[in-house]
Image (cartoon, rainbow, N blue to C red):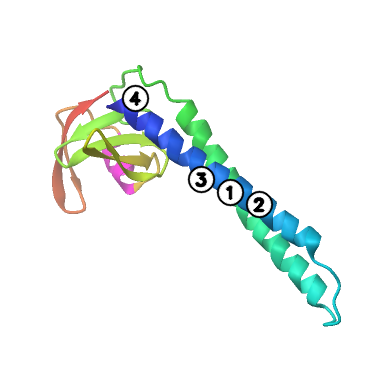
Amino acid sequence: MKEELLKLAKAKVQLRLDEARKAMTAAQTAANEETKSSAGNKYETGRAMAQNDRDMYARQEAEAKAEMAVLQSIDPQKKYEFPITGAFIETSIGKILIATSIGFLQVNGEKAMVISETSPMAQALKGKKAEEIFEFRGQHVKIISIS
């Protein structure tokens, strides 16, 4: 399941990357097409708004690139003893891939959570091994396996 989950996570991030690039190009085109009008500073305001949009999409693109870099650095065949980036953990409350903050994904009818190493769940898992029990948000959670 780890390999399929990683592929799905990459596809989701690639979609966000593509959407950010497309929106950034559209915002840049809109900024370039603004023309002076008789309304005074409408031209400058329109260009500034389009530039702000472009900057926002550029930030989204940078975030998606960083997430993709994390995902591409993960070897799905590598086995882990501890829950760190790249580890796939089966717990009593569900399956988790520590990679980047994506949320729930469904693979072959099973839900799994893709989280970042800085998320509260990953922090609760930190330093734990298979068969250990830890507390997360008032609930006892057992680590079934780490791979």
Q: Which mark is residue 16?
A: 3
> Of the residues under marks 4 and 3, which one precedes in the sequence?
4
| Residue 52, position as x, y percentages in the image | 68, 62
Label 1 is placed on what type of residue?
A: Ala
Residue 82 is drawn in which quadrant? top left
Q: Main secondary structure of the magenta part?
A: helix
Along the viewing direction, whichever of 134 and 8 lies nearer the viewer? 8
Q: Is residue 93 left or right of residue 125?
A: left
Looking at the image, the residue that sits furthest to the bottom is: 39
Which residue is labeled 1 in the image? 20
Q: Are marks 1 and 2 in contact (CB under 8 Å)?
A: yes
> Of the residues under marks 4 and 2, which one precedes in the sequence?
4
Q: Which mark is residue 24?
A: 2
Q: Residue at x 39, y 41 (%)?
A: 116
Which residue is labeled 4 in the image? 3
Q: Residue at x 14, y 50 (%)?
A: 139
Q: Are marks 3 and 1 in contact (CB under 8 Å)?
A: yes
| In magenta stretch: residue 39 | no
| Residue 23, position as x, y percentages in the image | 62, 53
Residue 140 is drawn in which quadrant? top left
Q: CA distance from mark 4 to mark 2?
A: 31 Å
Q: CA distance from mark 1 to mark 2?
A: 6 Å
Q: Are marks 4 and 1 in contact (CB under 8 Å)?
A: no
Q: Residue at x 81, y 72 (%)?
A: 43
The span shown in magenta is 120-126
Q: CA distance from mark 4 to mark 1?
A: 26 Å
Disc 1: CA contacts within 10 A as few (<14), some (14-19) or many (>=20): many
Q: Is residue 143 left or right of residue 1?
A: left
Say which quadrant the N terminus sits in: top left
Q: Nearer the viewer, mark 4 or mark 2?
A: 2
| In magenta stretch: residue 121 | yes
